Amino acid sequence: MRCPYCSSLDTQVKDSRPTEDETAIRRRRVCAACGRRFTTFERVQLRELGVIKSTGRRVPFDREKLERSIDIATRKRDVKPEQVEELVSRIVRRLESLGESEVPSKVIGEYVMEELKALDSVAYVRFASVYRNFSETRDFEKAIAELAGEAPTTRQ
């Protein structure tokens, strides 16, 4: 494993343990060249997933991109990194269980919305505002009403 700090290939595993949901192995590593420590995760990958964007373009699925977008939505919220990791793992398992080699980005977005709705309402609205491209306050009102299970009120 290459050190993310100095790019040396001489790194050693100091500790390995399963993650809480037991879908990955967490490894603490130390670089022999610079002495810095870092963490890696090892996961089973059932198949290579592709994403079909709304434009029709096809790109490889990127778990880290998914995790980053969820991290942004949950920033400064009472959500632990382990919860985000578990949420991402659940979404990836759902995608893999579809049995398709390519998945529309809309499906991924809807899975994220479902998971965030159950995890944190503010993170849900934050993600929805980007995912659904909110352009006015009425869009936020609709999302909040949807979250509360109500019909949105219309303003005159």
Image (tube, rainbow, N blue to C red):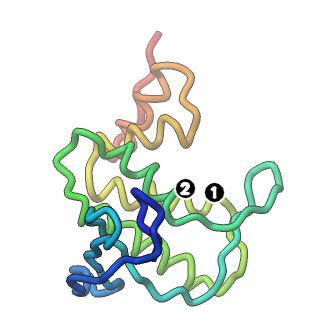
Residue, x 55% and y 55% (percent of image)? 109
Question: Which residue is labeled 1 in the image?
Answer: 106
8 or 18, which lies in front? 8
89 or 38, which lies in front? 38
Residues under numbered marks 2 and 1 in contact, where contact means CB atoms less than 8 Å apart: yes
Residue, x 63% and y 86% (percent of image)? 47
Q: Identify residue type, mark 2.
A: Gly
Q: Identify residue type, mark 1.
A: Lys
Q: Where residue 24 appears, x then y in whole percent?
A: 35, 83
State whether residue 86 appears in this view: no
Q: Which mark is residue 11?
A: none
Q: Where residue 82 appears, x then y in whole percent?
A: 24, 66
The picture quadrant where one finds residue 57 is: bottom right
Toward the top, the furthest residue is 156
The picture quadrant where one finds residue 140 is: top left
40 or 103, which lies in front? 40
Q: Where residue 55 appears, x then y in whole percent?
A: 81, 49
| Relative horizontal placement of residue 152, taking residue 104 as reference (left or right) | left
Q: Where residue 106 appears, x then y in whole percent?
A: 63, 57
Q: Is residue 146 above or below residue 101?
A: above
| Relative horizontal placement of residue 48, taking residue 43 as reference (left or right) | right
Residue, x 29% and y 40% (percent of image)? 122
Q: Secondary structure at mark 2?
A: helix
Q: Which mark is residue 109?
A: 2
Q: Secondary structure at mark 1?
A: helix
